[in-house]
């Protein structure tokens, strides 16, 4: 909470104590439902009229961590990416010109006011970018399958406190999260960037290695803008509902990324390529779900 100036600090503290806020176990579903309501409107609402007043809340010991949803800003950024990746003739099929004009006007007004363009949450659809595995270690994983078992080691009661995850319950939860300290995340990204630059240069990478300097630099800049004692989470979000228990238990993407980077540093190119290929083979079918009937 020390990262927030007043009066935001007081407001977020009161929010964390409120019984009416969406609890972590339901927050993702609440955010998703709100988005569906906006998209189902006529005309669709690309972004809410006002910024969200909700946040993800985590307690670790005596510390309180707040991650504002920032739904309006994230919606603008997502729509900007959508327009960049979609042919101009197809955009009106998803949002009429009047909607696009309103989005552009509101977004420009936000920027002129000097408001932040840094979201607290980075979002990716249908997959986890491989660079996002770099800040974490395999022991920082918390997997809950909603059936009273945990994916860390052998089956265990889902009320077990996992390293970095805090007390959890799996009454109706299904989630896969990695949590680490900001200092560790930054160190791992910086070290990985050094390895990639030394072995691969400053390019953005490509198959089969996929971990380019450009992507790591971008991630490092985003991490550098937060309080040094923050926590960093990688949340699989809605992907856990598309993947079965066996897939989630077997997912070793963080560990394989670490092995690939370590092999690259030692000059063991074949091992680095093998690990990168394994990562790509795991995630390629998941990304393909985007265009599945």
Image (tube, rainbow, N blue to C red):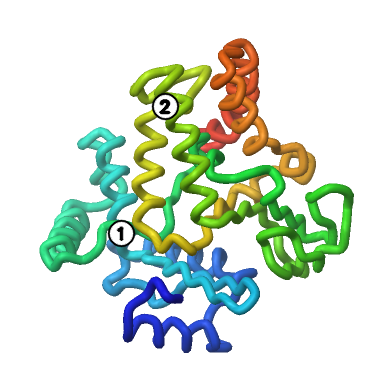
Indicate left or right for 13 with 41 as reference: right
User: In screen coordinates, is 97 left or right of 283?
Assistant: left
Q: Position of residue 77 (x, y in %)?
A: 30, 52
Rendered residue at 67%/56% (across/down): 175
From the viewer's perspective, is residue 38 above or below residue 78? below
The 10 Å Cα crowd at callout 2, few under 14, some 14 to 19, many 20 or more, is: many
For the question of whether residue 237 can be seen, the reply is: no
In front here: 74 or 204?
A: 204
Q: Percent x, y for residue 172?
A: 74, 67
Distance, label 1 to label 2, CA atoms, is 32 Å
Front tag of 1 and 2: 2
- Answer whether residue 285 is visible to the viewer in this image: yes
Q: Quadrant where the C terminus lies?
A: top right
Question: Label 2: which residue?
Answer: 212
Q: Residue at position x 69%, y 36% from top?
A: 252
Name the secondary structure under disc 2: loop
Determine the residue positioned at 74% across, 57% down: 144
Instruction: Say which mark, if any, is on residue 261.
Output: none
Q: Earlier in the sequence, mark 1 or mark 2?
A: 1
In this view, the residue in front, 212 or 249, is 212
The quadrant holding residue 212 is: top left
Identify residue for label 1: 46
Up the image or down, 54 lies above or below 181; here it is below
């Amino acid at each position: 909470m020390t990262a927030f100036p007043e009066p935001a600090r007081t407001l977020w503290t009161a929010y964390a104590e409120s019984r009416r806020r969406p609890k972590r176990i339901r927050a993702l579903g609440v955010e998703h439902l709100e988005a569906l309501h906006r998209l189902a409107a006529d005309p669709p609402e690309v972004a809410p009229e006002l910024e969200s007043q909700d946040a993800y809340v985590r307690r670790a010991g005596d510390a309180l961590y707040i991650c504002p949803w920032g739904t309006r800003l994230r919606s603008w950024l997502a729509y900007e990416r959508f327009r960049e990746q979609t042919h101009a003739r197809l955009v009106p099929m998803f949002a009429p010109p009047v909607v696009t004009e309103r989005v552009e006007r509101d977004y420009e007004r936000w920027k002129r006011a000097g408001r932040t363009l840094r979201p607290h949450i980075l979002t990716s659809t249908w997959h986890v970018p491989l660079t996002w595995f770099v800040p974490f270690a395999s022991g920082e994983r918390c997997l809950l399958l909603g059936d009273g078992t945990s994916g860390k080691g052998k089956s265990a009661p889902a009320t077990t406190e996992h390293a970095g995850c805090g007390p959890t319950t799996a009454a109706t939860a299904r989630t896969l999260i990695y949590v680490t300290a900001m200092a560790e995340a930054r160190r791992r990204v910086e070290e990985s960037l050094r390895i990639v630059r030394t072995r691969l240069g400053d390019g953005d990478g490509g198959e089969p290695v996929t971990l380019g300097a450009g992507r790591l630099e971008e991630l490092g800049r985003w991490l550098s803008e937060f309080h040094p004692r923050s926590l960093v989470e990688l949340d699989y979000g809605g992907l856990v509902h598309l993947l079965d228990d066996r897939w989630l238990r077997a997912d070793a993407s963080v560990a394989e990324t670490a092995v690939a980077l370590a092999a690259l540093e030692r000059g063991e190119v074949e091992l680095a390529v093998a690990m990168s290929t394994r990562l790509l083979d795991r995630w390629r079918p998941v990304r393909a779900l985007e265009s599945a009937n």
